[in-house]
Image (cartoon, rainbow, N blue to C red):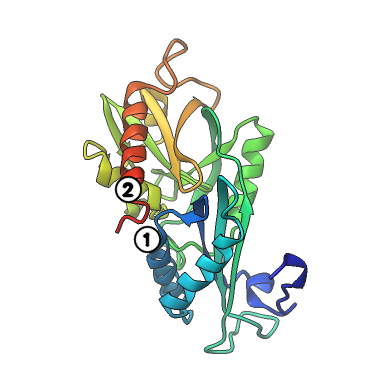
Amino acid sequence: MAAAEARISVFDRGLTVGDGVFETIKVAAGVPFALTRHLDRLGASATAMGLVTPREQMLREAAAAVCRGVAHLDLARLRITLTSGPGPIGSARIAGRTTLLVTAAPFTARAGAESVVVVPWRRNEHGATTGVKTTSYAENVVALAAAHRAGAGEALLVNTAGELCEGTGSNVFCVLDGVAVTPPLSSGCLAGVTRALVLAWYPDAVERVLDPGELRRAEEVFLTASTRGVQAVEAVDGMRPGGPAAMVPGPVTRAVAAAYAAGAARDPDPR
């Protein structure tokens, strides 16, 4: 239906208390990329939140119907949002009720390299919603706004243990001694779909705990996300990874991006 016709309750808990989960999926010429992985993560997030998950076939049919509306576009962004539905004004739920919204909109691929800053707020790796892609995104909104004020395009967060965690809408990789390294899920970062595919398609990439200081000595830094793909970082807190004369993207970032592009071309729905 047209956006002007779509309506949900003003008491929907996705609005009133952020009680919901979502996925954002890249769509090229009407075809969603890695849909199965995104639906799997949506289900895992819903389970963690105690939400009733719609049947997978319903989700696929809804996604296909909305994607047909953007099939004429080179690129679009598909969003699947699931909330606990209308309820009281407060924290209590009405069990078994949900709202499902599937929307799509055009988007332009991010061109060039990104700049990032490390923000002072800490990601709680022990929280009730750690690793869950919830609609409670206020923390990310505040952090990203701070990055924008600093002239950067993304904010990186450290967890309560002082370890590098993730971006507001991305996972982060550092290239150290020629090896692409990303924080483990135990850091509290989201289990990014693109992150997982990079680890699968570029076997030299590894997971380990990263100290934020390693961002400063990294030869290269790059971000991964469904709508970013693999994106080089040209500045961390105003400093160029690898030094002022370093090439951006560097050789490892280019190799990772090539491996990711080749994998995506082979299989638009990798399991």
- 256 vs 145, left or right, is left
Q: Which numbered disc covers residue 37?
A: 1
| Residue farthest left in this picture | 203
Q: Secondary structure at mark 1?
A: helix
Residue 94 location, x and y as percent? 59, 89
* Amino acid on which the number 2 mark rests in the picture: Leu
Q: Is residue 174 visible?
A: yes
Relative vertical location of residue 191 with respect to residue 66 in this rendering, above or below:
above
Q: Which mark is residue 197?
A: 2
Q: Give neighbour class at mark 1: few <14, some 14-19, many 20+ (Cα, 10 Å).
A: some
Based on the displayed image, in which of its 4 quarters is residue 135 positioned? bottom right
* 228 displayed left or right of 151: left
Q: Can residue 207 be seen in this snapshot?
A: no
Q: Who's the residue at 38% across and 55% down the image?
A: 191
* Quadrant of the rendering where the N terminus is positioned: bottom right
Q: Residue furthest right?
A: 4
Q: Could you tell whether 34 is left or right of 170 in the image?
A: left
Could you tell me residue 182's position as x and y percent? 33, 41
Q: Residues within 10 Å of mark 2 (few under 14, many from 20)?
A: many
